[in-house]
Amino acid sequence: MYSALPRPASFAPRGPLRGSVRVPGDKSISHRSLMLSALAIGESRVSGLLEGEDVLATAAAMRAMGASIERSGEGEWRIHGVGVGGLLQPQNALDMGNSGTSTRLLMGLVASHAISATFVGDASLSKRPMGRVIDPLSLTGAAFNASPGGRLPLMVRGICPAIPISYRLPVASAQVKSAVLLAGLNTPGITEVIEPVPTRDHSERMLAGFGAELSIETGAQGVRHIRLHGEAELKPQTIEVPGDPSSAAFPIVAALITPGSEVTVTHVGMNPTRTGIFKMLEAMGADLTYSNERVVGGEPVADITARHSALKGIEVPPDVAPSMIDEFPVFFVAASMAEGRTITSGLDELRVKESDRLALMAAGLTAIGATVDECEDGLIIDGSGGAPLPGGATIASALDHRIAMSFAVAGQNVREAVTVDDVSPIATSFPHFENLLGAMQDGGAV
Ligand code: S3P
């Protein structure tokens, strides 16, 4: 997946950021579009698909299991599915590259088919815990042979018919929820996921959109019971993927911290299970305005304009974490340039993302001159009050796209350039990020 050679890049301020930009399609929705289309009989069409390495890994895996998946234009894809229950035995190991979402969701799909599959990935993915998916899927009768610590490479031996389960999520994870629901598609009876803390609900929305029988009941203290009736029949769909709010967070924070900036990001997904970052930035005093609000393919979408703002430190309530889980790295950059103290907690999950994001952000921000205290489950950051940080350091991106992009953003408000040792991981989720940053520096739209 990645080119063998690391590609370093340096980032330094070049004045205000300006223009109107569009970020790539939502990564979570892109993965699910391909997976569900590959299980529907007939032709589905997807536009705005994120053509990053993670999503291409999902496309390759679905092809290896029998679906026909073709690119017909930029972001335009046509998929002919095999039907629920119709996945074929892949001939080779499925290479998941850097993608945790591909791995965990596909483990769910394979679990209830009479096939077996071996999953392999890069050095970062091979360190990430898969036990959280193996545990519930084992209850359905599927068998697993994993590397020590429940890690990749691992083999899944699916079972058909699988046993329907009722599973209460022990960690707030949309990937675990989705893996169980996807296994339920080809399982007779009702598969239930009980979700004490809400996480992104793209799987639920899209399963219903493809015609699966799914009910959601919200009980005491907001606990959600999601029930899926298998064996489902999925009907092909036409899907327009909204822009990824997780990707939009990078140009938005860049505009907020760079004096004189005003940037509009168009067509951003505004699903409430994803917008915690915008709410927390607004709580810090960010000048964000929303326009052109509409619904695209069952998901709310808006254009967001961000202007340079005098940010103030805040305490982030831990229950907001799932709705901004991927945005903490760039949020920490904003906090490091705000006035006063920002306190975050309840973020243990950040230690098992593409990298240990608490450790790497604490080390990287400290290296560029920020004041950061790393705690077990969060960071405490004393900001510069808007002043540029010293910069002048080289940051290890450690195969983590969001670490690389966060320090590119930090490089917009420093006295000396910030170097990222390897920016190639950015291609997993935001292939044109550097062009887009350059265009904003040049003051133009992309
Ligand atoms: C995702 C869920 C989240 C998120 C990841 C994408 C998904 O992971 O961090 O980038 O598409 O379901 P967890 O389920 O591990 O929180």
Image: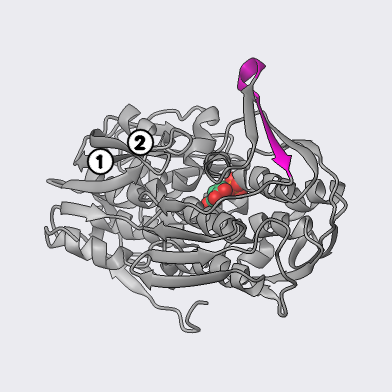
Residue position marked by numbered label 2 in the rendering: 278
Q: Of the residues shown, which amino acid type is indicated by label 2?
A: Phe
Q: Which disc number belongs to residue 304?
A: 1
Q: Where is residue 51 in the image (x, y as percent from the top left)?
A: 42, 66
Q: Residue at x 62, y 28 (%)?
A: 216
Q: Which residues are the magenta region?
A: 219-230
Front position among marks 1 and 2:
1
In the rendered image, the vertical position of residue 205 relative to residue 67, given as above or below: above
Q: Give the mark nearest the N terminus, 1 or 2.
A: 2
Foreground pick, 103 / 371: 103
Horizontal relation, residue 76 to residue 188: left or right = left
**Front residue (pair 117, 162):** 162
**Residue 239 position (above or below residue 427):** above
Q: Could you tell me the amino acid type at mark 1?
A: Ile
Decide whether residue 73 is among the magenta residues: no
Left/right placement of residue 15 relative to residue 144 reads left
User: Is residue 131 shown left or right of residue 413?
Assistant: right
93 vs 283: above or below: below
Decide: few, some or many residues near mark 2? Use Cα within 10 Å; few <14, some 14-19, many ≥20.
many
On the question of residue 355 being in view, the answer is no
Q: Which residue is drawn at 51% across and 65% down?
A: 79
For the residues labelled 1 and 2, say whether their Cβ atoms are less than 8 Å apart: yes
- From the viewer's perspective, is residue 165 above or below residue 239? above
Q: What element carries label 1?
A: strand
Secondary structure state at the residue bearing disc 2: helix
- Residue drawn at the location 54% of the way across and 37% of the way down: 322
Position of residue 276 measured from the top left corner of the image (x, y, whole percent): 43, 34
Q: Which residue lies furthest to the top in this view?
A: 220
What colour-coding does the image apply? one colour
Q: Which quarter of the picture shows residue 111?
A: bottom right
Residue 302 picture location, percent across and down: 29, 39
